[in-house]
Amino acid sequence: MTMDQGGEFYRRLGLKRVINGASWLTMLGGSIMPPPVVKAMEDASRWFVDLYELNRKAGEVIARFTGAEAGMVTAGAASGMLLEAAACMTGTDPAKVHKLPDTTGMKNEIVIHRAQLVGYVHSFRAAGARIVEIGNASGTQEWELGEAINEKTAAVAYVFSARQGGVIPFPRAVEIAHSRGVPVIVDASAMLPPPENLTRFISMGADMVTFSGGKGIMGPQSTGILAGRKELIEAAMMNAAPNSDAIGRAAKVCKEEIAGIITALELFVDTDHDAVLAGWRAQCEHIVNALKGIPGIRAELAEAQPELDEAASTHPRALIYFDKSWKGPGEKEVVQRLKDGDPSIRVGSAGFTGGIAIHPVCLQKGEEELIARRLREILTGKKS
Ligand SMILES: *Cc1c(COP(=O)(O)O)cnc(C)c1O
């Protein structure tokens, strides 16, 4: 796909094109769907179909690719988290399904590391769950997890996202939870690629795992997948659309979206991810090379480190640091000027210590050249 295609609608509304060097952010539209995904959605739009049957069939595909007993399509990973919590609290009891978010008489506590408290945990609370936090930034003792589990515990939640200081390793957390008869629910929203993660958390004992459909899988931005144990997926389905009397009704997916995410998932599994990674690396290298020799600016290529199990290091990045000797515009101003241009260029942050990170995962072909040129202009004050 070239960068000059599309955009008629956005132009009509007077919107600027965004070059997304900031990764799969909902705020910027998630990912760009490959043409076969869009085609599958268009094709699916021509028939009526039974939505219960459709999501069951889609769930069979998800189960096959994740190695789980069952699966379903959700309205994003956040909706997957809502349904994880709901399923663990209600089971398949219709009276409890009807009652949510009132959890009177149910197990309603979800235990989670304080270090994993991402904003999306709101989705657990939206189902009616109470969050019980354990540990702190410097560490978590295994007894803290054991201690936090009681007769009110519905699940232990585990989030794979930013780097996690001092958390109990996932396999140990699973062991402790299971020894107390409590399921483990996982948010692995942005952990694809690497494709191995599709099966990895399930094979390590997770009872339910959710991934975003609109990030690395490149399906519709408003979708996600949920995989897990049969009776828990059954419970999640009871709490989901198309049922009207269900907490998950406010997060429905349509037939076209289900066709889109399943097609995207099939494509994702068939993709040569090494080649994709090499392409991303080359885009980062181009940017890093273009910024060589600017005094006071340090540009580096950060290699992919999927073994760290953190979302940002699953792919290579171009990192730009401002040394103490730097005399030009500061980091904030550079980011603002990138954003204010047309097209608007959005970038990420290299970390707590400052610096700019350019994530290549959403860059269309050739956009790395535009970013490199624009950055050089801003940093050197010279048109190139
Ligand atoms: C993006 C993200 C989510 C939400 O995923 P959606 O598919 O946008 O609903 C949840 N958790 C984490 C860690 C994320 O990065």
Image: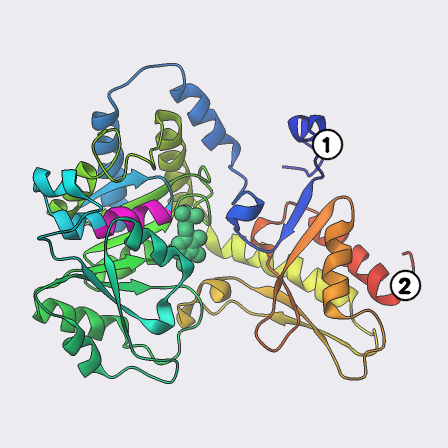
Image quadrant where residue 381 sits: bottom right
Give percent across and percent down for residue 375.
Answer: 78, 60
Q: Is residue 14 above or below residue 194?
A: above
**Which secondary structure lies at badge 1?**
loop
Span of residues in magenta: 77-85
Type of amino acid at the residue the image marks with label 1: Gly
Decide which of 337, 306 is in the foreground and name it. 337
Type of amino acid at the residue the image marks with label 2: Gly
The answer, for residue 196, to whether it is visible in the render is no
The answer, for residue 180, to whether it is visible in the render is yes
Q: In this view, does 366 lie above or below 7?
A: below
Q: Which residue lies furthest to the top in this view?
A: 47
The residue pinned by badge 1 equals: 14
Q: In this view, does 163 lie to the left or right of 10?
A: left
Give percent across and percent down for residue 162.
Answer: 44, 67
In space, the residues marked 1 and 2 are separated at their CA atoms by 29 Å
The residue pinned by badge 2 equals: 381
Residue 177, label in figure: none
> Chief secondary structure of the magenta span?
helix
The residue positioned 17% from the left and 57% from the top of the image is 108
Q: Is residue 48 above or below residue 247?
A: above
Q: Is residue 100 magenta?
A: no
Image quadrant where residue 12 sits: top right
The residue positioned 35% from the left and 50% from the top of the image is 211
